[in-house]
Image: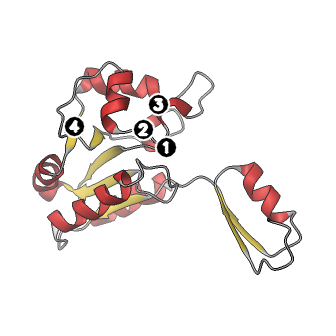
C-alpha cells in the first residue's frame, strides 16, 4: 500500500521502522516517532470539560493511538480542583507503593514499553500489576516530578495511564511540556 501509485502522501507515526518504510516507499511521506503529548490545563480552562476531553481521548481505544495524551500538567493553585475533577470522572491516583509497582510493570528490563499493557483497560492493567482499584476506574494516574528515559510515567504509554505534574506557574508548566516532548 505504501508503494501504490495512487498514494498522494503518507503520514507515518510510530516506530523508526514504520517511518523508514514510508520514506523509502517512493511516495511523498511525513514521519514522526513515538508520541508523548502532554496536556496543560490552564487556569482559565473549564476543568470538567478539559478533563472529559483528555479522558475520552485516553480511554475510547484504551490509549493505543500515539497521539493520545500521556500526561496532565496544571498550575499549583488549581491542582486540587483538577485532581478532584479527575477522580470524579474515573481517575485512580496511585499511592507511592502502587506507583512503584506499576512503574516496574510499564517498562521491560531493556527499557522498552511492556507490550502486555498496550490497549488494555485501567482495570486490567491494575489487576496485572496487583493493584486493587474501584470498578469506576477509567484511568490510572501517577503524580510525578521528573521527566526522563528511566521514568516510565514520563514516556509514551499506549494505555490509560497518565502522569500528573503540578507546576508553580504557566512558565514552569510550559518548560515541563517541552521536557516531556
Mark 1 residue element: loop
Circles 4 and 2: CB distance less than 8 Å? no
Q: Tell me if residue 177 comes above or below residue 42 in the rendering.
A: above
Q: Position of residue 111 (x, y in %)?
A: 59, 29
Q: Residue under circle 1?
A: 155
The correct choice, above or below, for 32 with respect to 98 in the image is: below
What secondary structure is marked by label 2? Answer: loop
Q: Earlier in the sequence, mark 3 or mark 1?
A: 3
Per the image, the residue denoted by label 2 is 120
Task: Rate crowding at label 1 as few (under 14), some (14 to 19) or many (20 or more) other CA atoms within 10 Å.
Answer: many
Where the N terminus falls, by quadrant? bottom right
Q: Nearer the viewer, mark 3 or mark 1?
A: 3
Q: Is residue 122 visible?
A: yes
Instruction: Indicate which disc residue 93 carries.
Output: 4
Closer-to-camera residue (143/33): 33
Mark 3 lies on residue: 106
Left or right relative to 88: residue 42: right
Q: CA distance from mark 3 to mark 4?
A: 16 Å
**Any part of residue 169 in sight:** no
Say if 167 sits above or below 131 in the image. Answer: below
Residue 173, percent from left and from top: 32, 59
Locate residue 81, reporting x and y percent: 10, 55
Amino acid at each position: 500500500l505504501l508503494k501504490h501509485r495512487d498514494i498522494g502522501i503518507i503520514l507515518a507515526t510510530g516506530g523508526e521502522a514504520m517511518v523508514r518504510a514510508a520514506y523509502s516507499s517512493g511516495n511523498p511521506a511525513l514521519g514522526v516517532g513515538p508520541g508523548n503529548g502532554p496536556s496543560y490545563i490552564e487556569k482559565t480552562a473549564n476543568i470538567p470539560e478539559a478533563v472529559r476531553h483528555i479522558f475520552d481521548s485516553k480511554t475510547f481505544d484504551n490509549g493505543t493511538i500515539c497521539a493520545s495524551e500521556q500526561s496532565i500538567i496544571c498550575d499549583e493553585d488549581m491542582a486540587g480542583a483538577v485532581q478532584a475533577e479527575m477522580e470524579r470522572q474515573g481517575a485512580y491516583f496511585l499511592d507511592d507503593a502502587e506507583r512503584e509497582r506499576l512503574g516496574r510493570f510499564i517498562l521491560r528490563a531493556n527499557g522498552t514499553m511492556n507490550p502486555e499493557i498496550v490497549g488494555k483497560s485501567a482495570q486490567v492493567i491494575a489487576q496485572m500489576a496487583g493493584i486493587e482499584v474501584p470498578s469506576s476506574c477509567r484511568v490510572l494516574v501517577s503524580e510525578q516530578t521528573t521527566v526522563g528515559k528511566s521514568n516510565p510515567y514520563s514516556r509514551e504509554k499506549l494505555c490509560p495511564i497518565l502522569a500528573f505534574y503540578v507546576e508553580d506557574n504557566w512558565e514552569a508548566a510550559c518548560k515541563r511540556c517541552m521536557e516531556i516532548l
